[in-house]
Every structure is written in structure tokens, then in C-alpha cells.
Image (cartoon, grey):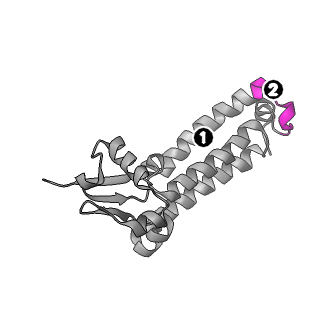
């Protein structure tokens, strides 16, 4: 049961090709404030996209919610689906917080790329990272430019490389 003026404003029941500028603008405004609310529910960690679980929520939420704006999916059920994704994410992150085994499955584990200024070749191979790829990360982080300047480099769960430089 919808309120007639809301149905008219949002173009509910219209096919995507029949939505006018006003409908898309109204849908965009509603979705904007709805997503703002969802982001408050999702907490800050989602915005930081710290690990694969956060990136997954971002991708699913973005593709799902865009359909509510362009009319290719039902408006309110799509928004409800977005809420379900955020609640699931929040629940899974809580479970992962309490269970290291679940955290490893959902988030992955950091791996060592450099140890004492030497490449850890099996790890580089397993993650399809070349020396050039990792040295680029060194330079972009401003931490080093060559492997022999690095005490330890870790390929973190979020895809970034953290670097510990040698004290010498």
C-alpha cells in the first residue's frame, strides 16, 4: 500500500523508460538520504574498505541501489535489500571480531613479501606480484625505493603493502 503522491513523485510502477527527470531526481534524493542512514548503520569500517568483506558490501550496495534510482528494479524492495546487505555485513564483522577462524575466511590474512631485505618468492608467486609491483608500492608509500632498504614488507588484507625499514 503506497501513498498516491509518493507513488507519483517517485514514478513507482513506471517502466525505466517512462521515468521522467523529476522521478529520477526525487529517487536520487530519497536514495541519497537512505544511503547516508545505511552508512551510519554500517559504521566507519565499511567506509574505510579495510578488507574484502567491506569491498564486497560496497560493490553489492552500489549496484543494487543504483537500480532503485534508474527504475530497473522495484524501489522499496531494492532499498530493503540494501538494508539486509548492511545488516549482514555488520553481523559478519561482529562474528569475525570474535572468531579468528571466521576472520581469516572473510578477511584473509596478511602475508610477508620481504624479509630482511630479501624477496619471499613463494609469496610473490602465489599472489602474482612482481618485484616491480611491490617496489612501486614502496615508492608510493614513500618508505623505500629498493628491496634492500626494507626490513619487512607485508601484503595486507586490504591489498596495500606495509613496509618496515631497516634501522641502519
**Circle 2 residue:** 20
Question: Horizontal placement of 143 versus 97: left or right?
Answer: left
Question: 101 or 12: nearer the eye?
Answer: 101
Tell me: residue 25, above or below residue 114. above
Instruction: Check disc 2 and report its element: helix, strand or loop.
Output: loop
On whether residue 18 falls in the magenta region, the answer is: yes
The Cα atoms of the two marked residues, 2 and 1, are separated by: 21 Å
Q: Residues within 10 Å of mark 1 (few under 14, many from 20)?
A: some
Labelled disc at residue 64? none
**Who's the residue at 27% across and 46% down the image?**
144
Is the Cβ of the residue at disc 2 closer than 8 Å to that at disc 1? no
**Disc 2 versus disc 1: nearer the observer:** 2
Asked if residue 159 lies left or right of residue 120, the reply is right
Q: Nearer the viewer, residue 79 or 112?
A: 112
Position of 98 with respect to 91 (left or right) is: left
Quick one: label 2, few (<14), some, or many (20+) residues within 10 Å?
few
Residue 165, percent from left and from top: 22, 53
96 in the magenta segment: no
Q: Quadrant of residue 113?
A: bottom left
Would you name the residue on which mark 1 appears?
A: 34
Q: Point out the residue furthest to the left here.
A: 168
SS label for mark 1: helix
Q: Specify start and end residues of the magenta stretch as a single range.
A: 13-23
Compared with 153, 16 (above or below) is above
Please state the horizontal and vertical placement of residue 117, each as a whole percent of the image: 25, 59
Where does the image place residue 149, in percent across and percent down from the top left? Answer: 23, 52
> Is the residue 21 above or below the residue 143 in the image?
above
At which x and y percent is residue 110? 39, 64
Q: Earlier in the sequence, mark 2 or mark 1?
A: 2
Picture residue at 44% right of the left edge, 54% below the top: 159
Amino acid at each position: 500500500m503506497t501513498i498516491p503522491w509518493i507513488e507519483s513523485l517517485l514514478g513507482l510502477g513506471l517502466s525505466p523508460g517512462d521515468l521522467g527527470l523529476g522521478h529520477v531526481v526525487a529517487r536520487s534524493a530519497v536514495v541519497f538520504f537512505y544511503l547516508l542512514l545505511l552508512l551510519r548503520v554500517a559504521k566507519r569500517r565499511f567506509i574505510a574498505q579495510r578488507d574484502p568483506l567491506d569491498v564486497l558490501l560496497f560493490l553489492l550496495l552500489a549496484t543494487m541501489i543504483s537500480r532503485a534510482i534508474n527504475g530497473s528494479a522495484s524501489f522499496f524492495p531494492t532499498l530493503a535489500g540494501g538494508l539486509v546487505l548492511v545488516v549482514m555485513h555488520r553481523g559478519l564483522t561482529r562474528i569475525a571480531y570474535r572468531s579468528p577462524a571466521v576472520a581469516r575466511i572473510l578477511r584473509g590474512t596478511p602475508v610477508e613479501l620481504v624479509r630482511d631485505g630479501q624477496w619471499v618468492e613463494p609469496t610473490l608467486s602465489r599472489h602474482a606480484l612482481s618485484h616491480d609491483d611491490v617496489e612501486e608500492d614502496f615508492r608510493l608509500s614513500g618508505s623505500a625505493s629498493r628491496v634492500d632498504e626494507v626490513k619487512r614488507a607485508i601484503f595486507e588484507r586490504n591489498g596495500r603493502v606495509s613496509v618496515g625499514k631497516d634501522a641502519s
